[in-house]
């Protein structure tokens, strides 16, 4: 199972970056120009599967990125080696950038278990009409998206929500179009309901629904987010890549 979903993920990642998938196997650093039609709103995107590393960078900064002497290839993930110098270079040109990451990307290695919901909870799928009621509250921002974010608005698809006995949402796993055949899962649990198994229950249900539809569930979190990593592993998801993003700063 893992190989099939990994291959699909890698093909989409290479398309987003604008590189040959073989670049991930070179044990070298490859710098490419960000495709004009790339779906990601990034100035630079760094990605590795563990063997080779690819940097995709906006045409305005391609020469700058190519002049950086970075070795070994994975050192590009150190902020002082690439992300911060790029931010500083952009600042000198009158642009405000920010960087985020690295994060871990997960795909399925096995079918997700069937986690029972705690007593008194029920789960059901919801769409955009339901989402609109809770979006502005920011209570479930990781699963519903950030209010006013046009990029997220374009790619959000649906959610599986765990409702409490009072009919109010306690946890949810939202989905986002992550590329051809990929659906990203974003999970959020309301603070009063954390630690009772709701994250595993909604993520596993969402992953199972995505797999049943013939697509690949993807999942992202920071290397420091141990709780989120445990949720991923519990639901049959394992790391496939690391990524770092440089983008235009909010409000710039």
Image (cartoon, rainbow, N blue to C red):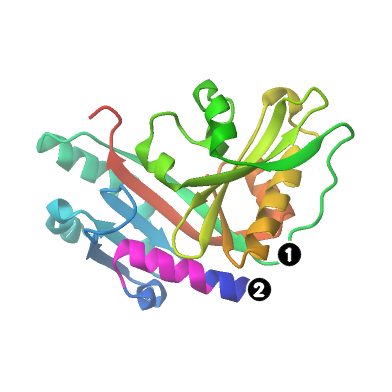
Please state the horizontal and vertical placement of residue 24, each as a whole percent of the image. 40, 72
**Residue 197 can be seen, yes or no:** no
Would you say the residues marked 1 and 2 are in contact, meaning their CB atoms lie under 8 Å apart? yes
In this view, the residue in front, 84 or 96, is 96
Most frequent secondary structure within the magenta stretch? helix
Task: Quarter of the image for the C terminus: give it.
Answer: top left
Q: Residues within 10 Å of mark 1 (few under 14, many from 20)?
A: some
Q: Quadrant of residue 201?
A: top right
Query: At numbered mark 1, what does the secondary structure look like: helix, strand or loop?
Result: loop
Q: Residues within 10 Å of mark 2 (few under 14, many from 20)?
A: few
- Which residue is tagged 1? 111
Judge from the rendering whether residue 245 lies leftward or rightward of residue 94; answer left or right. Answer: right
Disc number for residue 1? 2
Earlier sequence position, callout 1 versus callout 2: 2
As displayed, is residue 193 above or below residue 247? above
As displayed, is residue 70 above or below residue 122? below
Query: At numbered mark 2, what does the secondary structure look like: helix, strand or loop?
Result: loop
Task: Name the residue located 58 percent from the left edge and 25 percent from the top edge.
Answer: 139
- Compute the Cα span from label 1 to label 2: 8 Å
Task: Quarter of the image for the N terminus: give it.
Answer: bottom right
Please state the horizontal and vertical placement of residue 219, each as a whole percent of the image. 57, 52
Q: Which range of residues does the magenta coloring cover?
A: 7-19
Task: Name the residue located 25 percent from the left edge and 64 percent from the top edge.
Answer: 31
Please state the horizontal and vertical placement of residue 178, each as a whole percent of the image. 46, 55
Find the residue positioned furthest to the right.
119
User: Is residue 11 covered in magenta?
Assistant: yes
Q: Quadrant of residue 109?
A: bottom right
Disc number for residue 40? none
């Amino acid at each position: 199972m893992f190989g099939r979903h990994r291959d699909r993920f890698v093909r989409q990642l290479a398309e987003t970056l604008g590189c040959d998938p073989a670049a991930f196997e070179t044990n070298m650093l490859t710098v490419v120009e960000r495709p004009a039609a790339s779906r990601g709103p990034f100035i630079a995107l760094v990605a590795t599967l563990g063997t080779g590393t690819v940097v995709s960078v906006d045409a305005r900064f391609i020469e700058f990125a190519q002049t950086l002497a970075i070795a070994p290839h994975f050192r590009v993930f150190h902020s002082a080696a690439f992300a911060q110098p790029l931010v500083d270079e952009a600042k000198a040109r009158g642009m405000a950038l920010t960087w985020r990451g690295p994060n871990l990307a997960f795909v399925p290695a096995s079918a997700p278990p069937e986690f029972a919901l705690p007593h008194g909870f029920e789960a059901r799928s919801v769409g955009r009409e339901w989402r609109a009621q809770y979006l502005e509250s920011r209570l479930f921002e990781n699963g519903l998206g950030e209010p006013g974010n046009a990029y997220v608005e374009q790619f959000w698809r649906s959610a599986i929500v765990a409702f409490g006995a009072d009919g109010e949402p306690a946890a949810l796993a939202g989905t986002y179009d992550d590329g051809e055949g990929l659906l990203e899962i974003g999970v959020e649990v309301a603070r009063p309901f954390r630690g009772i198994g709701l994250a595993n229950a909604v993520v596993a249900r969402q992953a199972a629904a995505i797999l049943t539809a013939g697509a690949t569930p993807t999942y992202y979190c920071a290397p420091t987010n141990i709780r989120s990593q445990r949720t991923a592993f519990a639901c049959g998801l394992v790391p496939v890549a690391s990524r770092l993003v440089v983008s235009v700063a909010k409000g710039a």
